[in-house]
Image (cartoon, grey):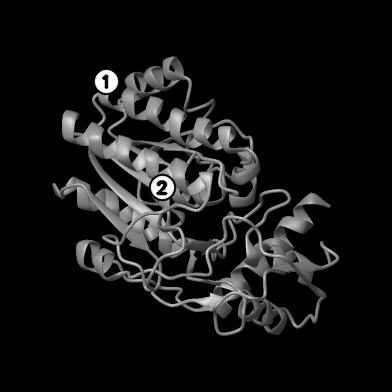
């Protein structure tokens, strides 16, 4: 099987490429390198620089490489930026995805796995949140992803494009073998920022909001190790190959940690007591969001291996040390 991975030079996409080539799949990576790195791609994968919005290029890739499945990661992902630059997100995440889906339909691609987000739920009325709960995004990022979910479902109904939509909760950690990890410059992910602060790459870390209705006043999130998330994608491909019907699934562990709890875990694991400052809430941040993961366990038999915050942090620390050494 030949699989097209969009955004395969990025954080999550590069982990996916390694997982696929390890199982003997032929992999084509399409990435514009706006946030990804060519060195993060598994050497045996074929890499093409380009944009998912380039229909001529995407159509040619599908035809020339007989693409049977697409795993679509390419997107802009920073919630605060989406509030200040919404049109960028509707172009990258919605319009370009629509073009990719059309190319898939026209090119006879059989299977499509879409990287969505828990941000589609907004600030849910209850936690854990299930896939059937209302969607009410609080940011253009969440809205742009929800729009693509709708496009994909409608295209599937009209054209028979088998698909799985995976709604990610907070992805963190790194490949345990340290082949790739979170390498984005000026990243905003909490674990990444805290790890960089612990290693002296940032002067301080800021906590945005301490007056949320949570156990310590800071936001609570469900953190999932990137390797467990990738295993869910592998399971999704196998599910579709077995003839499984289209499905939308949460990807999380079903329990959460506050911002302060994550920071304390990074301090403990790193052995560094770094500076923490406090700031006002950021627009677009829900107070608490935790996955109800029952459906993905039932559909795939998905079994996480790294459901432990200290392990997630340790892998992130190890990767950041390697990444810092690489750049010196």
**Whole-percent x and y of residue 227?**
46, 62
Above or below 106: residue 315:
below
Measuring from the top left, give residue 260's x and y in whole percent: 65, 79
Question: Visible in this render: residue 110?
Answer: no
- Among the 4 quarters of the image, the one containing residue 136: bottom left
Q: Nearer the viewer, residue 82 or 309?
A: 82
**Circle 1 — which element?**
helix
Task: Give the CA distance from mark 1 to mark 2.
Answer: 21 Å
Q: Which residue is mark 1?
A: 106
Of mark 1 and mark 2, the one earlier in the sequence is 1
Q: Is residue 214 left or right of residue 320?
A: left
- The answer, for residue 316, to whether it is visible in the render is yes
Q: Determine whether, in the image, residue 223 is placed left or right of residue 84.
A: left
Residue at image location 34% in from the left, 42% down from the top: 149
Residue 32 figure quarter: top right
In the image, residue 12 sits, relative to residue 317, either above or below, namely above
Asked if residue 304 is positioned above or below residue 182 in the image, the reply reads below
Q: Quadrant of residue 296?
A: bottom left
- Element carrying mark 2: strand
Which residue is labeled 2 in the image?
115
The tally of labels here is: 2
The residue located at (49%, 79%) in the rendering is: 308
Residue 177, x across and y down, in percent: 55, 63
Percent from the top left, x then y, of residue 134? 32, 58
Q: Residues within 10 Å of mark 1 (few under 14, many from 20)?
A: few
- Left/right placement of residue 152 relative to residue 14 reads left
Closest to the observer, 204 or 268: 204
Q: Are the two marked residues, 1 and 2, in contact with CB atoms closer than 8 angstroms?
A: no
Q: Is residue 46 above or below residue 260?
A: above
**Closest to the observer: 174 or 113?**
113
> Which corner quadrant holds the N terminus?
top left
279 sits to left or right of 7 = right
């Amino acid at each position: 099987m030949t699989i097209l991975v969009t955004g395969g030079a990025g954080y999550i996409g590069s982990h996916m490429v390694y997982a696929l080539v390890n199982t003997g799949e032929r992999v084509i990576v399409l990435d514009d390198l706006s946030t990804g790195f060519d060195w993060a791609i598994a050497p045996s994968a074929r890499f093409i620089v380009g944009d998912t919005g380039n229909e001529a290029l995407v159509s040619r890739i599908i035809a020339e490489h007989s693409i049977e499945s697409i795993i679509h990661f390419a997107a802009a992902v920073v919630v605060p930026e989406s509030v200040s630059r919404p049109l960028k997100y509707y172009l990258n995440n919605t319009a370009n995805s629509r073009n990719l889906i059309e190319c898939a339909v026209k090119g006879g691609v059989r299977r499509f796995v879409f990287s969505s987000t828990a941000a589609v739920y907004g600030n849910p009325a209850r936690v854990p949140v299930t896939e059937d709960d209302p969607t009410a995004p609080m940011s253009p990022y969440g809205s742009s992803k929800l729009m693509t979910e709708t496009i994909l479902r409608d295209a599937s109904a009209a054209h028979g494009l088998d698909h799985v939509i995976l709604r990610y909760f907070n992805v963190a950690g790194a490949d345990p073998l340290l082949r790739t990890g979170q390498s984005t410059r000026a990243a905003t992910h909490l674990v990444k920022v805290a790890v960089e602060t612990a290693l002296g790459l940032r002067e301080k870390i800021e906590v945005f909001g301490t007056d949320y209705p949570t156990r310590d006043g800071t936001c609570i999130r469900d953190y999932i190790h990137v390797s467990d998330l990738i295993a869910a994608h592998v399971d999704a491909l196998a599910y579709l190959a077995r003839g499984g019907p289209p499905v939308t699934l949460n990807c999380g562990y079903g329990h959460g940690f506050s911002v302060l709890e994550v920071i304390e875990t990074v301090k403990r694991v790193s052995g560094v007591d770094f500076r923490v400052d406090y700031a006002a809430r950021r627009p677009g941040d829900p107070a608490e969001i935790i996955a109800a993961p029952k459906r993905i366990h039932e559909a795939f038999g998905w079994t996480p291996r790294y459901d432990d915050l200290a392990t997630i942090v340790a892998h992130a620390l190890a990767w950041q040390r390697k990444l810092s050494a690489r750049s010196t």
